[in-house]
Amino acid sequence: MTDTIKLDIISDPICPWCYIGKAHLDKALGEHPGHPFAIEWHPFQLNPEMPAGGMGRREYLEGKFGGKEGAVRAYAPVVEHAQAAGLNIDFEAMQRTPNTIDAHRLIHWAGIEGRQTAAVAALFKAYFNEGRDIGAHDVLADIADSIEMDAAVVLKLLQSDADIDDIRKRDAHSREMGVNSVPTFIVGGKHAVPGAQPPELWHKVITELTNAA
């Protein structure tokens, strides 16, 4: 019996590299059913200054990349790596770039119910495959319902300030530790593994940890 090892994942549900990184990790974990990891997801906002209601995707891309052509260049490697990981990202379907504070609150509440990874997966799917606005409370409540959480309770919590300060403090703590990009994986509270690492790296890590145990 291998001892459990904490795998902390710092990510944002609108980060395409986080989506790709999760797919790579999932592939490796699927091939190591006895893997030692106990996974916990942690908040990091790529755009902490985003207006509460988000903004139009076109306006966002023009501000960040100087327009569509700059965005196409910036996202070309994302598209390539997503396809290699078997993922389909529908950039055309995305009409808004949300503020993700409420999505992070949903992930936190899902964690209390043991559904955290399911919440992360559902948010990635909603945003990258379906182009849904995951900053909208009704969308988040619908996602909660899809992973067997109580949508009415989640909606009520979203309409309050519950856990907003906590999410912001946890985000700030990660930055203070030196995290400046996501995904960042922290193995056993000691070793930081930045970026969307390929399944082969996770195979190696899991094998080494299992042998060491």
Image: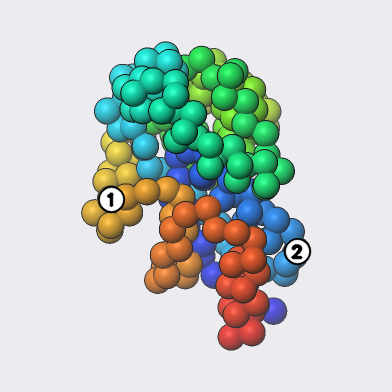
**13 or 145, nearer to the observer:** 13
x and y, in percent, of residue 136 in the image: 48, 17
Instruction: Tell me the residue that label 1 is attached to.
Output: 175
Could you tell whether 161 is left or right of 104 in the image? left
Amino acid type assigned to the residue bearing label 1 in the image: Arg
The residue type indicated by label 2 comes to Glu
Residue 52 lies in quadrant: top left
**Residue at image x 64%, y 22%?**
130
Report whether residue 205 is seen. yes
Lateral position of residue 30 relative to residue 211, left or right: right
Q: Secondary structure at mark 1?
A: helix
Q: Is residue 118 above or below residue 184?
A: above
Of the 4 image quadrants, the one containing the C terminus is: bottom right
Q: Tell me: 172 left or right of 142.
A: left
Q: Looking at the image, is mark 2 or mark 1 earlier in the sequence?
A: 2
**Label of residue 31 in the image:** 2
